Image (cartoon, rainbow, N blue to C red):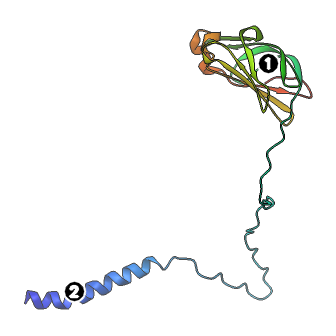
Amino acid sequence: MRVQLARTLAPRIATSLAVALLAGCAGLPGPAPRPAEGAPAAREPSTASPLPAPSGKLKPMPLRTFTVSTQCNFRDEAGNFGKALVDVENSKVKALNIELVMPKRGTCRYDLTQFRQTQALPSIELAGKNNCRVRMWEQGEQVTVSFADCHNLCSPASAHDYVWPLLIDKPTGKCD
């Protein structure tokens, strides 16, 4: 009796599984319905790229020097503040004196006498002791000054963990 019951249930179970699998495919998108006459047609999503197609060979960006000169004071939303003297002419650093104060964290001071310029293009790099690096690059009308591994120029050294890049607006000379 059990064998006979199994023989009659097996095809039903197989059929139920097949229906369940096919039902899972029922949600797949099919062709879009046509709009009714007089109704505005739906716009097809654009597959065109907003960028022009490459011509086959990419050309390197031209290397250009930049010039910026500022003496500014700044304060950010977190209460950090400081002052900066930055003078760069044709990607050659002539003056650099930056003091960053992070209240309850510490102070960091960067002076050109602590560095030697190791790179001018495509971005400026100043190398100091203990792998400390100051980098500068131009982005549109802004110059970014970043600091990496400069714990030895901060008091206490942990203050460097809270240092953000300095942004200089070239047209106005303002710092952020």
Name which of mark 1 and mark 2 comes first in the sequence: 2
Q: Nearer the viewer, residue 78 or 142?
A: 142
Q: Residue furthest right?
A: 171
Name which residue lies at 61% across and 18% down: 131
Q: Nearer the viewer, residue 34 or 124?
A: 124
Q: Is residue 142 left or right of residue 7?
A: right
Name which residue lies at 32% across and 84% down: 16
Label 1: few (<14), some (14–19) or many (≥20) C-alpha neighbours in 10 Å: some
Q: Percent position (x, y) of residue 6?
A: 15, 86
Q: Are marks 1 and 2 in contact (CB under 8 Å)?
A: no
Q: Locate residue 14: give its quadrant.
A: bottom left
Q: Locate residue 173: give its quadrant.
A: top right
Q: Percent position (x, y) of residue 20?
A: 37, 80
Name which residue lies at 61% across and 20% down: 149
- Disc 2 marks a residue whose amino acid type is Ala
Q: Is residue 10 left or right of residue 117?
A: left
**Which quadrant of the rendered structure holds the N terminus?**
bottom left
Read off the residue under disc 1. 74
Read off the residue under disc 2. 10
Label 2: state its secondary structure: helix
Q: Percent position (x, y) of residue 134?
A: 71, 21
- Disc 1 marks a residue whose amino acid type is Phe
Q: Is residue 58 above or below residue 176?
A: below
Q: Nearer the viewer, residue 15 or 89?
A: 89
- Distance between the alpha carbons at the discs numbered 1 and 2: 79 Å
Label 1: state its secondary structure: strand
Q: Percent position (x, y) of residue 22?
A: 42, 82
Q: Is residue 14 left or right of residue 162?
A: left
**Which quadrant of the rendered structure holds the C terminus?**
top right
Image mark count: 2
Q: Is residue 49 left or right of residue 151?
A: right
